Image (cartoon, helix red, strand yellow):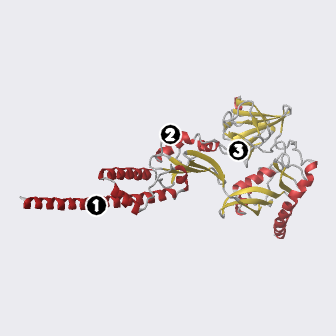
Amino acid sequence: MSLISKDFRLNTKREEQHSHARLRWALFAIACAGIGVVIASTNTEESISSSDIAANSLPEITTITKSPEELTRESYSLSLPELQAKQKIINNDNAFSRSLSPKQWRDFTVKPGDSLARVFKRAKIKPQQLDELMKAGDAVKKLRHIFPKDTIRVLSDNNGVLLALRYEIDQKSYLMVERKQGTLDAQIIDHQIETRQTHASGVINSSLFLAAQKAGISQNVIMELANIFGWDIDFVLDIRKGDNFTVLYEELFRDGEKIADGNILAADFVNNGKIYRAVRYTNPQTNNTEYYTPDGKSMRKAFLRTPINFARISSRFTTSRYHPVLHKFRSHKGVDYAAKRGTPIFAAGDGKVIFKGKKGGYGKVLILQHGTKYTTLYAHLKTYNRKLRNGSRVKQGQTIAYVGSSGLATGPHLHYEFRVNGVHRNPLTVKLPISKPVPKRYLADFDLMTSPIMAQLDLVTRPHQVALTEN
C-alpha cells in the first residue's frame, strides 16, 4: 500500500513539473508575441509621423515603450487570462493606428460639369468634409470657381477624412489646406517668382500679329502694346507697311522655368514715319499705374478710338449709304466693324449704362453715358456682359458685350456711334479729350523712375533703327 502511495505521489509531482514547464513556455511565447506587436506598433507610428501633414492632423497614439526584458518579467507575473486581455488591448491599438495611416497625395482633374462635391465623391472623401472645408475661411472661396482641366490634390485617411488639399489658383499662387489640431486651416501661398527683363523688335509687312509672331512676342504682349498706343493709332486704318516697334517687357519665372509674360515697361512704335513712345509709371500717392509719354503726358485718352480689337471696317460714317437690307439710301451715323460672332466689345470710356435692350433695326443695343457731354452706342449685339444692368458703372476697356447680328444686319458686326451733346460725330475723326498728365509735384519722381527704363529702351531701339535704315 505504501509503495503505491509513493508512486502516485511521484507521478503527480512529475505531472505538476511538466505542467509548470508548459505554462512557462506558453507565457514566454505570449511575451514574444507581445514584443513583436510593440515593434510593429512603433514602426506604424514612425510611418505616420513621416508625413508632416499627417503628423499635424492625427490624434496622439500612446505606444508601449517598455523594454523586452521588462515585458518578459511582467508576463511571468501575470496570469494567462490577464496576458490574453493585455494582448487584445495591444491588437486594438495597433488596428486603430493602421486605420489612421494616410494615403499618398492623389491628383484629380476637374471634368466638364464637375463640382467640388463630385471630386470629393471620386476621392472617396466623406460629404461632411466638404461642409467643413467650405467653413475654413475666405481663402477656400477660390474653390467655388473651379474649371475643367484644373487639378485638385487631396490627402485623406482610410476613413474618408480630409487631411490636406492643394489647388493651383494661377501661376503665381496656390491654395493650401491642412488639418492642424483636428481643424482644417486654409491659406493662399505665393510662389517664389523671379522677374527678368527682355526686349523684342518687329517690322510690319502685313499685320501687327504676324510681325509680333515673327519677333517671338506672345499674343498677350502684343495686345497690351496695342492697348497702350490704341488712343493715338487706329490699328485697323493707320497701320502701314514698314511700321516698326520695339518693346521692353518683363518675363516671369518659377523654379527657373518661364511661366508668363509680365508688364510692358516701355515701348516705341513708328507709324507712318511718326514716333510714339510710352513708359510705365506708378503714381506714389494713388498707386495707380498708367503709361505716359517721356515728358509725362498720359497715353490714355478719355475714349478709345476703336472699341473692338483688329476688326475690319465694313461701313463708314456717311450721310448717304445704300442699306443692304432696306435697299434704299439713308444716312449711316456710325462705323461698322465686321468681326466674328462673339468677339468682345469694349467700353470706349468710363461711364454708366443708360440703356440695355432691343431698339428697332439696331437689334440688341447698349448705350453708355460718359459725363454730361458724351454718349456711345453699341448695336447688333449677340449678348451682353451678364453683370451689367441699367445704371451699372463701367471702366474704359471693360468688356461690355459681344459681336452679333441682331436687328437689320446681313452678318455679324458691331455698329458703333459716338455722340457729343446728342449730335452724331464720326468716331474715326472726332477729337478725343485727353486724360490728366503726371501731376507737377511728381514730375521729379517720374523722371527719377522712368529715366533708367527709357535709357534701356534707347539701347535696344537704336540698333534696330540702324538696321532698318541700312535695309
In the rendered image, residue 351, in percent from the top left (x then y), is placed at 79, 36
The image position of residue 235, as x and y in percent, is 78, 51
The reply to whether dot 2 and dot 3 touch (C-beta < 8 Å) is no
Circles 1, 2 touching at the beta carbon (< 8 Å): no
Judged from this view, the residue extending furthest toward the front is 2
Find the residue positioned furthest to the left. 1
- Label 1: state its secondary structure: helix
For marks 1 and 2, the one nearer the N-term is 1
Q: Mark 2 or mark 3: which is in front?
A: 2
Q: Which mark is residue 338?
A: 3
Badge 2 is on which residue? Answer: 128
Q: Are marks 3 and 1 in contact (CB under 8 Å)?
A: no
- Residue 233: give x, y in percent of width and height: 82, 51
Amino acid found under the numbered disc labelled 2? Gln
Relative placement, left or right, of 267 versus 131 is right
Would you name the residue on which mark 1 appears? 24
Query: Judging from the image, what secondary structure is the residue with disc 2 in?
Result: helix
Could you tell me how many numbered marks the image carries? 3
